[in-house]
Image: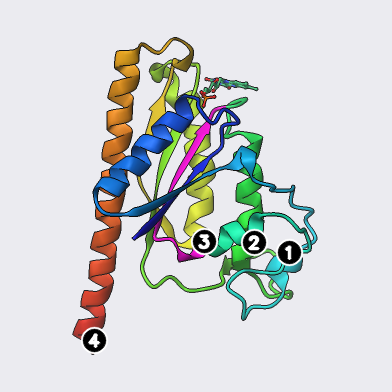
Amino acid sequence: MLILGFLGSPRIKGTCARLLQSALDGAASCGAEVKRFDLITCNIQYCRGCGTCFLNNPELTIGKCPLKDDMHAILEQYVRADGYVFASPVYDVFVTALMKTFLERKIMLTYRPKDEHGTIPGPRVPAEFKKKATLIVTGNCGDELEEVMGDPCFEAWQAHLPIEQVDTVGQLYVGGVERLADSTLAEKCKKAFQNGRLLAGAIEAAVHEKWNSRYRSA
Ligand SMILES: Cc1cc2nc3c(=O)[nH]c(=O)nc-3n(C[C@H](O)[C@H](O)[C@H](O)COP(=O)(O)O)c2cc1C
């Protein structure tokens, strides 16, 4: 089982990074192979909106993008993975521009025939089983403001991921990060670790179900 983590914070040693790492450690403790992408260190350009990737080559797993950057190589690993951890600080009541830019470029994973105007592009490769993701958001505003600060970020992923047939398994908002006591951070990291374990467990169950249903229909 392969689980990838994506960090939307430019601070690769910040709170969001620590929580993401805890979630990946949790998944690894269940036997998952894990890999972390710090988006600030990747060359990911803005989508230019040309439509080349999603309007052409339905036979490809990843649409062809004219931009020459790291995105295609990242997506090659993305399509092989079974699950994901997405982590972003709240910046102006949304995920960071780093995370949003990455999400926009994942349109390369979708396809829409040219004459089907006004429809949502679909996944290029039908899911063999529903992949899973867990979500992490950090903000300066306290935990009591999760609805205001965290929810728009969670929704950014939750609106995006169903197109790829990815379900969400757990979400964690950690507020008040500027003044977080070490003991509180340790507690939140424990929660992230637990969410990583839940993610790995949910993937294992989904894969098991896939094989069971194949066996039953054989
Ligand atoms: C440009 C900018 C915008 C921010 N906007 C918000 C915000 O809307 N709500 C909030 O609670 N915190 C906001 N913050 C605080 C960040 O969410 C906080 O610094 C971050 O979660 C810390 O995580 P890190 O240690 O990974 O950088 C903002 C910070 C910056 C730099």
Q: Which mark is residue 77?
A: 3
Instruction: Reply above or below: 75 against 141.
Output: below
Q: Earlier in the sequence, mark 2 or mark 1?
A: 1
Q: CA distance from mark 4 to mark 3?
A: 30 Å
Cβ atoms at labels 4 and 3 below 8 Å apart: no
Which segment did they paint magenta?
A: 77-90
Q: Earlier in the sequence, mark 4 or mark 2?
A: 2
In the image, which is nearer the foreground, mark 4 or mark 3?
3
Instruction: Reply above or below: 17 against 73.
Output: above
- The kind of residue on which mark 2 rests is His
Q: How many residues crowd mark 2 within 10 Å: few (<14), some (14–19), many (20+)? A: many
Query: Can see residue 154?
Result: yes
Element marked by disc 3: helix
> Which residue is more in the foreground, 132 or 5?
5
Q: Which mark is residue 217?
A: 4
Query: Can see residue 170?
Result: no
